[in-house]
Amino acid sequence: MKYVKVFTNFKRSMEGLSDAEKGRLFDAMLEYAETGEEPNLPGNERFVWGSVLNMFDAMNRFNEKQRANGLKGGRPAKFNETQINPENPNKPNESQKSLKEKKRKEKKYIEKESKEREPETAFEIALEEFRQHRKLMKKPLNELAERKLMNELERLSGGNEAIKIKIIDQSIRNGWQGVFPLKADRYTDYEQRPVSEHSLDHLLTNLDEV
């Protein structure tokens, strides 16, 4: 079924026409859309017919474009700043450049803030010491490595911050790149404990009495 698409601004073209002339004009538009034959208009509506033809031409061009896009699989997608420039896939468009520059500035700002913020807690100080330790080893911590380090510290310490600090100190002392469970103390509470000076005097006294 054919149809006639009339835009509201066409109302201005019909100003000054009588109701009869408007009626004949619309009848002529319907007939032209159906048959393609131009009418023989007797009144002032004939002066508006040029605008009607322009409107039909615009509508036909739009319909042709829609049909062509349909054959290609639909309306071509508009690319935005996150997509490749179709005219030059290897060259980012201006929006892409702006987005990339924005992300670069944000990353630089975050890194600057992180560096300028002084460690406050004992754990933060220990962690910063471990970062410096890794830099001296020429194996600096990247973001992923530090996140994994934090997870491992949490697992080994059971969430105890004091134990986390001891684990970090142990790695720094031994020149380790990673973190590992705390080694057992050299002496237990009651076995192989170093003899105090008082205990040694007591032992010598007992020997003298033997």
Image (tube, helix red, strand yellow):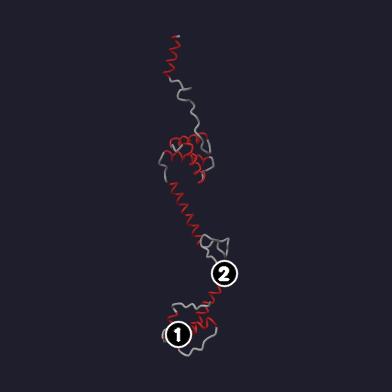
Q: Amino acid at mark 1?
A: Gly
Select label 2 or label 1 by which is in front. Answer: 1
* Above/below status of 191 relative to 175: above
* Above/below status of 16 relative to 73: below
Residue drawn at point x = 53 percent, y = 36 percent: 176
Extreme residue toward the right, this view: 71
- Among the two numbered marks 2 and 1 on one chain, the one whose residue lies closer to the N terminus: 1
Residue 191 percent coordinates (x, y): 47, 22
Pick the front one: 4 or 141: 4
Label 2 sits on residue? 70
SS of the residue at dot 2? helix
Pick the front one: 121 or 13: 13
Label 1 sits on residue? 23
Q: Amino acid at mark 2?
A: Gly
Position of the C terminus by quadrant: top left
* Above/below status of 184 relative to 20: above
As measured in the structure, the alpha-carbon distance from the residue carrying label 2 to the one carrying label 1 is 36 Å
Residue 9 percent coordinates (x, y): 44, 78
Badge 2: residue crowd in 10 Å (few <14, some 14–19, many ≥20): few
Badge 1: residue crowd in 10 Å (few <14, some 14–19, many ≥20): few
Q: Quadrant of residue 12?
A: bottom left
SS of the residue at dot 1? helix
Residue 87 percent coordinates (x, y): 57, 65
Residue drawn at point x = 42 percent, y = 15 percent: 202
Residue 49 percent coordinates (x, y): 49, 85
